[in-house]
Amino acid sequence: MTNRDLEYYQRREVQERSNAEQADDSTARRVHQEMAERYSAKLRDMAQSIPEARA
């Protein structure tokens, strides 16, 4: 993964959390929250695969 990938996932997580906060519909809110969690999980996976991040 590159820094660009990291920045992308971080940006998308923030965007999806914002979309969830602004959603009027509970289903849309839930879907945006789930997407944000997926981006967050991807970032955690990336951090675990970087040796210096584990130290």
Image: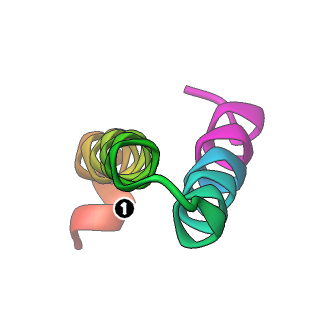
Image point (71%, 39%), residue name: 8
Is 54 magenta? The answer is no
| Image quarter of residue 13 | bottom right
Residue 20: horizontal and vertical position, in percent?
52, 61
Q: Secondary structure at mark 1?
A: helix
Residue 4: horizontal and vertical position, in percent?
77, 35
Spot the residue most to the top: 1
In this picture, residue 45 sits left or right of residue 33: left
Residue type pointed to by label 1: Glu
In this picture, residue 23 sits left or right of residue 43: right
14 and 23: which is toward the camera? 23
Majority secondary structure of magenta residues: helix
Q: Which residues are magenta?
A: 1-9
What residue is pinned by disc 1?
52
Quadrant position of the C terminus in the picture: bottom left
In this picture, residue 12 sits left or right of residue 52: right
